[in-house]
Structure formats: structure tokens, C-alpha cells
Image (tube, helix red, strand yellow):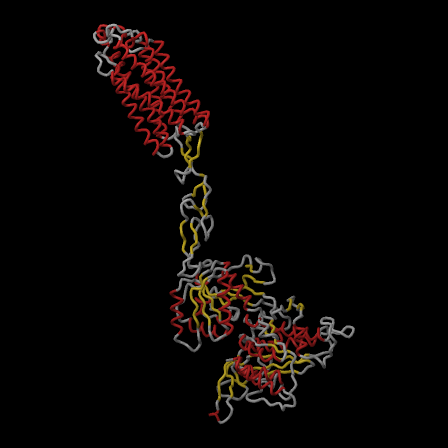
């Protein structure tokens, strides 16, 4: 609606400004409140009166509006402008020989403020433009409408409090400047604040009736999304829509966001807080916009739960010498023509300049220092400093415009102008290059968008027991600093948190995904409401909110939390573990039994039972069995290059030696009984020499096989990471599988041959037929090794080695027990059977 009014008023103004046209303002006028003539006039638009009422006169006359309430803050802005003009006029170095004047206009409501702007541009009684620049307004929406008029006339406008980022668009508002930071910087600062404290889940309350609120909220949402901050809800408030309040309260109570951004102008914030204070809203950290966050008069006992700990960015505090005294020295007699000042005075002191039965008489000499309101709050200045800088900016632009060296302006190089030929468009051009430092050390210049340097104080509300607020500065934001240093908190500053929190509250939709998980977006929820998925097997994430999990290197495996990769544990059959110790124990028992039997046989070597079974082969067999038991020990322990080659070759050779001895004993039994047949002379072909040669040849064949295996492709230590994902198996790779199976095959061939021969001799008559024992022992041997093959292939890790050791021990114990224990039993417990007479009845004499 404002832009339509602006277009209509601009059309009126264009008609008024046309050549040879009699000037006449149509409709309400007379908005000028304070004025002083000077060589150059500066206009100002302020809303000293704030609430308007329409008088329609029953449509018999033109309707008009009048104002019923007062804005003390706007009066302070107007008086600050007057103070600054007077200070500049006293300065001999700035605009020497030239005086500044001012015309300050007041209006309530957008339409009247636009009419006031037209009046400021056109003047009251002349068709000539009366001002070189216009200061104001505090509202972004009003400034936007005013600049539509001023831009077409090339009149510069400098605002002290219009913060809407939309006004930085030079295509739409080419003559607009401001000494207050754009809301774009406030938005960035607010986002950085929330990012700093980890507030990534927030709610927003704003109003659709204010350009400042709508634009600020929209920009905040866009900037927040860039930093991963999500908006849980965005609700609107209207002064007139009372039915909205219960819905807002319900949203606040049900929401999980602990942080609420109240982005409204001061008037809307006052209205909202006055209505919300009766509801029990607790547990929220309120963050305010610059427009209301420093207004201590908003505090009260009823609002303590809401405003305690509130935070927000405010314009920096500044001390302006002399301004305090100037403001507090105000008297109605200073501006006798101002009816508004009289009305304000009556409101300040609750008196009346007209005789009244209900009020005391105002003398006009009352002391402003005895009352407390927004006008008399003059300890420090925030927004007032922007008014101060705005006036100085125009003065410096005029000063630069009037400079002349060698017939041209040193800044632009154009022809010099004098004070009589100064035009607003020239002032506009020089405002772009203004760059100065105030007496208080503040740098003032405008960027290409007409914006000034963004500087804010981060303030914290700390409510006292009496309900008053102490607004403490706890940090700063300065856009001129390098990235990463723009936002800083003050050290050793006490911060009070909203919602009775003892420390900064957590406000997140979902807590960060811990290490060991990855962050997964949920398409049905805001980006902040992500899911945390555990890393898959073999992968880790070592930081919070990791978007991906990373696979560990092959030699590493995740810990239980899956937040770091640890070296995989190595597995091999060790002497220290129970299974390794048991197998070692059985191996030692086997060696001990073999040694014991050897001692028994050696002690009784002259007895018939030892001699009858070929004592030489028996001792050789016992020796080979000792080696078989000992070779099993080479399979236990950490595999090395030498142990891998030794374990298989030692096993193959010792077992062939063992089977060769058993085979020799079996052949000898067959030959012995064959020799009892008439005319047989077979024993001479298999005597002791032939027996030794048979064992040697059979063993050498295995030795040759092993040598070829070790030469071509020997066994080697191997780290197996395929069978188990979480650990490494240290094992001996076979090298050549053909060599391994050739070794086993040769042992099996001899065992089968030995079993077949013993089986043929099992029923030969004898009181002690050794062939029966050999048959049974070979049966056990073959059964063990036939079972070994599938068990060996299917057993994992160290169990493969254990199966192999078990097969060696089982087959060795089978041979030892089946062949030698019965003989030891007779030697020790049945000595009467260990006689030549007893054996002669069954055994051929030639075997003894």
C-alpha cells in the first residue's frame, strides 16, 4: 500500500514542480515541528507522535488524521539532530563560513510521513526545493516509500535506523544511505551467535505487518540454512488478531527448540510481550532483534521468565560529549511554536499548561533529570550516535563539494561550485565518497550499497529482583575484522541464560552423531533432524556428524565403538593358550612313553619276546616315534620361514621312517612263517641287511620328495586376512600343494601297503603274532589320516594346525600303544610268558 501512496504523492509533487505552476499542497499539511534557517538546509522525518486517529467530518470536508500518543525515543532523535547541527556550526574547520539549517517534520502513520517528506522537499510557500538532504526515517517501510520520491529528484536520504537489507538495492533506491548497519549484517551476526553456542534448532516469531520483520525473517532463514541451522516453526503475530496468541503459546509449549528468535520492531515487541507475559512460558532462550533488545523499559516482574537471559545484537554504546546536557536542558520555551513539545512536557510531568482541576499547572521549568523515561535515558547512546553520524556525513559531503583548487574540485575533477549553486544531486554524488572519523573515533564511510560498517554489541538481559533489567555487553561483532575474528565474546564476563538454564542450553533437533556412526539425511524431516546409522562392519568414523564411514586398512579393524582402527589381533597356535599347552603336553607324554618303552626293551633285550620281534627294527621304530612326537612341536608357535619348511618336511620324513620300520617288521613276519615250509630258503633274502636297506630306501624316497618341494616352491609364513575379517591368521602356506599332497600320499601308500600285508598275516599261528597288532595299529593310522583330510580342509585358522598335530599324535600313539604296550605288559606283568619254551610252541625256530 505504501508504494501506491508514494506514486500518487510523487505525481502530485511532479505537477507542483512543473514549470510556471502555482504551488499548492492538496490535503493535510503543516508537519514541520522544529526549524532553523541556514545556508544549507537539512530535512528530518521523525515519528514523535506515534498513534493516529482518522477524522472523516461525515465526508463534508476532507478527512484528516491526528495523533494521540507520543514517542519519546523519536523526540530524542530529533533533538540529537539539532544538537549535531549546532555543533557543526560551531566548528570552524568544517564548512567554514557556511551555516547549516534544519527543518524537522513529524508525522504518525505512513501516509502522513510521506506527506511530511513531500512537504520537506517542496517547502511550504515556494516552489524551490528547500533541502539538500533528508535524514530519516526510523522505519524501513517508511524509508522505502520516501526514497521512491527522493530518488527521482536525486535528493540524498540518510537513515539512522532503517535496517532492512532490501534498501541496499541501488537499482531501486539509488539515493539511499544509512549510518545503521543493514539487517543483512545483523542476520549474519545472529547466525554466527547461534552457531557459536550450537543452537541449530530454533523457532521464529515475527509479524507480517512490518517490512523490517518480514525481510529480516526471510533473510535469517536463508542464512541459517547455509550454516546448517533449521527452523522448527515460524509463527506470525498481529496486534489486532487476538485469536493468534493461544496458537503461538501452544506452539511454544509443544516445540522442542529451546531458542526463540523474536524478530519484530519495537512497537510490535511491546505489544507481544505485554500479551504473552500472562502465559507460563518457561524453558526458552529468547534472542531479540536490534530494534528492541536494548529497550530496558520492556522489563517487568511479570516478564522475568521471558526476558531473563535474553540475548541479541545492539548498536554499539557511545558517549557523545555534550549531548546528555543538551537533551536534559530542553524546555518548552526553546521551541515555543511546538505544540507537541508542550504535550510531551505535560505527559512527562503529569501537569497541564492550561488550568485544570485534575492536573497541576506546568511551569515549563521542571527538571528533566527528576524523571525516568526513554528520552531521559542519556547515560550512553546507541541509535542516537547514528543520527549524529548522519548529520556529519551530510556536512562532510557539503564540505567536500565546496572545495576548490585551481578552478576544479579536487575529489571529482569537475568545475568548482559555490554555495549558491549547490544542488542535491551534487551532495548525493559526494556522499558516496565520504570518509571521516568522528571525535569519538568512529569511522564513517559508505560502501557501494550505501551501507556503513557493521558493528554490534552482543547484549545479555540480567533481570534484577525489582524487575528492572541490566543490559550487559558480553561480546562484539565487527564486520570489518577478518573472517573468524568478527564475532568474539568478552573474557570473564558473566552470562545469564534464559529459561533458568545454568549454562548454554542445547537446542538441536538431533544430537550430533557420535564417532562410530554416520549422518544420514531423512527426506521427510528438516536437514537438522538427521538419522545416525552405525558404521558397517570394517568401517569407522572418527568425528561427530561424519557424513561417511571409512574402511580400515587391511591390517586394521575397528574397535567396539567403531571410532578408530586398531591393528588386527594375530592368531596362531601358541604354547601359552590351553589348546597349545595340551597338545604340547600330549607330545611330551608320547616322547616319555617312547623313551620308557625303549628303556624297558633295552633292559630286556635278551629276552625271547624282544628278540622274537626283531629288536633292531623295534628300537628304530621307537626312535622314529620319538621324532614323530617331537615334530608335532614344530607346528606350535608363531610361524616363521624356517619353522614352516621344517614342520612339514620333518613330519613327512619321520612318519615314512616310522611306517618303513613297521613295514619291515610286517614283511619279516610273513617271511618267518614262509621259512617254516619244507625246502624254503626265503629268510636269506630278507635278513637284517635287507631290512636296513628297505627302511633306508623307503625313507630316501620321501627325502627326495621333500627336497624337490623345498627347492621348487617351499612352504612360507602367510598372513591370512580373508578367513576372518576381524583378525589375522598367521599360518604356513603350503607353497606347492602338489608337494604337500605328494608327501601325504607317499605316507598313505606305505600305510596301506603295510596294512594289507599285516592283514594277510593276521591269522598265522603264534602265541604272540605281531601281525595282528600291526594290522590294528595300521587300521587306526589309516582311519586317523583319512579323517584328517576333510577336517584339515574345513578347519579355520589355528584349528587347522591343531587338527594336523592331533592326527600326528593320534597316529603315533596308535602305533606305540598297539605294537609295544602288549609286549611291555608281558615283560612286566607276565614274565612267565616271556620264555623260549612258551614261544617255541608257536613261533618258528628260525625267527628266534
Identify the residue at image location x=31%, y=8%: 605
Q: Is the residue 529 above or below the residue 157 in the image?
A: above
Indicate the position of residue 393 as horizontal and vertical percent values: 65, 72
Q: Position of residue 630 (x, y in %)?
A: 38, 21
Q: Nearer the viewer, residue 807 or 292?
A: 807
The quarter of the displayed image where residue 775 is located:
top left
Q: Is 403 situated left or right of 69 in this image?
A: right
Q: Position of residue 135 (x, y in %)?
A: 61, 77
| Residue drawn at 66 percent across, 80 percent down | 41
Q: Within the image, what quadrant is residue 353 found in?
A: bottom right
* Foreground of the two, 338 or 726: 726
- Residue 173: where, in percent of width, then height? 59, 75
Which image quadrant: the C terminus?
Answer: top left
Which residue, as the protein is rendered here, is positioned at the far right? 406
Residue that extends furthest to the bottom in the rendered view of this protein: 60
Occupied quadrant, residue 751: top left
Which of these two is toward me, 323 or 348?
323
Figure check: 597 above or below 315: above
For the question of whether residue 487 can be seen, the reply is yes
Q: Between residues 792 and 244, which one lies in front from this camera angle?
A: 792
The single residue placed furthest to the front in the displayed view is: 679
Amino acid at each position: 500500500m505504501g508504494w501506491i501512496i508514494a506514486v500518487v504523492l510523487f505525481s502530485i509533487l511532479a505537477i507542483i514542480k512543473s514549470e510556471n505552476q502555482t504551488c499548492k499542497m492538496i490535503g493535510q499539511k503543516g508537519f514541520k515541528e522544529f526549524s532553523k534557517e541556514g545556508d544549507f538546509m537539512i530535512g528530518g522525518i521523525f515519528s514523535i507522535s506515534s498513534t493516529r486517529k482518522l477524522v472523516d467530518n461525515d465526508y463534508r470536508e476532507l478527512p484528516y488524521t491526528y495523533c494521540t500518543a507520543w514517542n519519546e525515543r523519536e523526540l530524542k532523535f530529533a533533538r540529537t539532530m539539532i544538537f549535531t547541527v549546532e555543533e557543526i556550526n560551531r566548528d570552524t574547520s568544517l564548512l567554514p563560513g557556511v551555516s547549516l539549517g534544519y527543518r524537522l517534520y513529524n508525522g504518525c502513520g505512513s501516509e502522513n510521513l510521506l506527506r511530511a517528506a513531500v512537504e520537506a522537499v517542496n517547502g511550504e510557500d515556494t516552489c524551490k526545493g528547500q533541502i539538500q538532504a533528508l535524514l530519516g526515517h526510523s522505519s524501513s517501510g517508511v524509508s522505502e516509500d520516501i526514497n521512491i520520491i527522493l530518488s527521482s529528484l536525486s535528493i540524498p536520504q540518510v537513515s539512522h535506523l532503517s535496517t532492512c537489507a532490501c534498501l541496499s538495492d541501488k537499482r531501486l533506491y539509488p539515493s539511499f544511505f544509512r549510518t545503521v548497519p543493514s539487517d543483512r549484517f545483523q542476520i549474519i551476526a545472529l547466525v554466527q551467535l547461534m552457531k557459536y553456542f550450537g543452537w541449530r534448532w530454533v523457532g521464529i516469531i515475527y509479524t507480517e505487518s512490518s517490512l523490517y520483520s518480514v525481510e529480516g525473517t526471510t533473510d535469517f532463514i536463508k542464512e541459517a540454512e547455509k550454516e546448517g541451522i533449521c527452523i522448527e516453526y515460524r509463527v506470525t503475530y498481529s496486534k489486532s488478531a487476538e485469536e493468534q496468541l493461544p496458537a503461538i503459546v501452544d506452539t511454544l509449549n509443544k516445540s522442542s527448540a529451546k531458542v526463540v528468535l523474536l524478530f519484530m520492531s519495537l512497537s510490535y515487541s511491546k505489544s507481544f510481550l505485554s500479551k504473552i507475559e500472562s502465559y507460563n512460558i518457561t524453558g526458552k532462550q529468547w534472542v531479540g532483534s536490534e530494534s528492541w533488545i536494548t529497550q530496558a523499559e520492556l522489563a517487568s516482574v511479570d516478564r522475568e521468565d521471558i526476558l531473563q537471559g535474553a540475548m541479541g545484537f545492539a548498536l554499539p554504546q557511545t558517549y557523545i560529549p555534550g549531548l546528555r546536557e543538551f537533551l536534559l536542558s530542553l524546555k518548552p520555551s526553546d521551541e515555543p511554536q511546538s505544540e507537541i513539545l508542550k504535550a510531551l512536557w505535560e505527559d512527562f510531568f503529569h501537569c497541564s499548561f492550561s488550568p485544570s482541576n485534575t492536573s497541576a499547572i506546568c511551569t515549563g521549568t521542571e527538571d528533566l533529570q527528576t524523571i525516568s523515561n526513554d528520552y531521559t535515558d542519556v547515560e550512553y547512546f546507541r541509535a542516537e550516535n547514528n543520527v549524529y553520524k548522519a548529520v556529519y556525513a551530510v556536512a562532510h559531503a557539503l564540505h567536500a563539494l565546496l572545495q576548490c583548487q585551481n578552478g576544479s574540485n579536487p575529489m571529482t575533477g569537475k568545475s568548482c561550485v559555490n554555495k549558491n549553486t549547490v544542488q542535491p544531486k551534487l551532495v548525493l554524488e559526494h556522499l558516496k565518497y565520504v570518509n571521516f572519523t568522528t571525535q569519538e573515533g568512529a569511522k564513517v564511510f559508505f560502501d557501494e550499497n550505501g551501507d556503513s560498517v557493521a558493528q554490534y554489541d552482543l547484549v545479555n538481559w540480567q533481570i534484577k529482583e525489582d524487575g528492572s533489567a541490566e543490559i550487559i555487553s558480553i561480546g562484539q561483532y565487527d564486520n570489518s575484522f577478518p573472517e573468524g575474528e568478527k564475532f568474539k565474546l568478552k573474557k570473564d564476563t558473566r552470562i545469564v541464560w534464559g529459561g533458568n538454564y545454568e549454562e548454554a542450553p542445547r537446542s538441536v533437533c538431533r544430537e550430533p552423531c557420535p564417532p562410530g556412526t554416520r549422518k544420514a539425511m531423512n527426506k521427510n524431516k528438516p536437514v537438522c533432524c538427521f538419522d545416525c546409522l552405525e558404521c558397517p562392519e570394517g568401517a569407522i568414523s572418527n568425528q561427530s556428524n561424519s557424513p561417511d564411514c571409512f574402511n580400515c586398512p587391511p591390517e586394521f579393524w575397528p574397535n567396539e565403538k567403531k571410532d578408530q582402527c586398531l591393528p588386527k589381533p594375530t592368531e596362531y597356535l601358541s604354547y601359552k593358550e590351553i589348546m597349545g599347552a595340551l597338545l604340547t603336553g600330549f607330545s611330551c607324554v608320547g616322547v616319555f612313553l617312547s623313551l620308557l618303552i625303549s628303556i624297558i626293551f633295552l633292559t630286556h633285550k635278551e629276552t625271547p619276546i624282544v628278540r622274537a620281534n626283531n629288536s633292531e627294527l623295534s628300537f628304530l621304530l621307537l626312535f622314529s616315534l620319538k621324532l614323530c612326537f617331537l615334530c608335532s612341536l614344530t607346528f606350535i608357535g608363531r610361524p616363521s620361514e624356517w619353522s614352516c619348511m621344517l614342520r612339514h618336511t620333518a613330519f613327512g620324513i619321520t612318519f615314512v621312517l616310522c611306517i618303513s620300520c613297521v613295514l619291515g617288521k610286517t614283511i619279516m613276519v610273513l617271511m618267518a612263517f614262509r621259512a617254516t615250509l619244507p625246502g624254503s630258503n626265503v629268510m636269506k633274502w630278507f635278513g637284517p641287511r635287507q631290512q636296513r636297506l628297505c627302511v633306508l630306501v623307503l625313507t630316501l624316497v620321501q627325502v627326495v620328495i621333500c627336497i624337490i618341494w623345498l627347492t621348487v616352491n617351499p612352504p612360507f609364513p602367510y598372513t591370512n586376512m580373508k578367513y576372518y575379517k576381524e583378525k589375522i591368521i598367521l599360518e604356513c602356506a603350503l607353497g606347492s600343494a602338489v608337494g604337500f599332497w605328494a608327501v601325504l600320499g607317499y605316507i598313505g601308500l606305505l600305510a596301506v601297503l603295510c596294512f594289507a600285508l599285516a592283514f594277510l598275516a593276521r591269522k598265522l599261528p603264534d602265541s604272540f603274532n605281531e601281525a595282528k597288532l600291526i594290522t590294528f595299529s595300521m587300521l587306526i593310522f589309516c582311519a586317523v589320516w583319512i579323517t584328517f583330510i576333510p577336517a584339515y580342509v574345513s578347519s579355520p585358522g589355528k584349528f587347522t594346525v591343531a587338527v594336523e598335530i592331533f592326527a600326528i599324535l593320534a597316529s603315533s600313539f596308535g602305533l606305540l600303544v598297539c605294537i609295544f604296550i602288549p609286549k611291555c605288559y608281558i615283560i612286566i606283568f607276565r614274565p612267565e610268558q616271556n620264555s623260549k619254551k612258551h614261544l617255541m610252541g608257536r613261533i618258528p625256530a628260525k625267527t628266534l
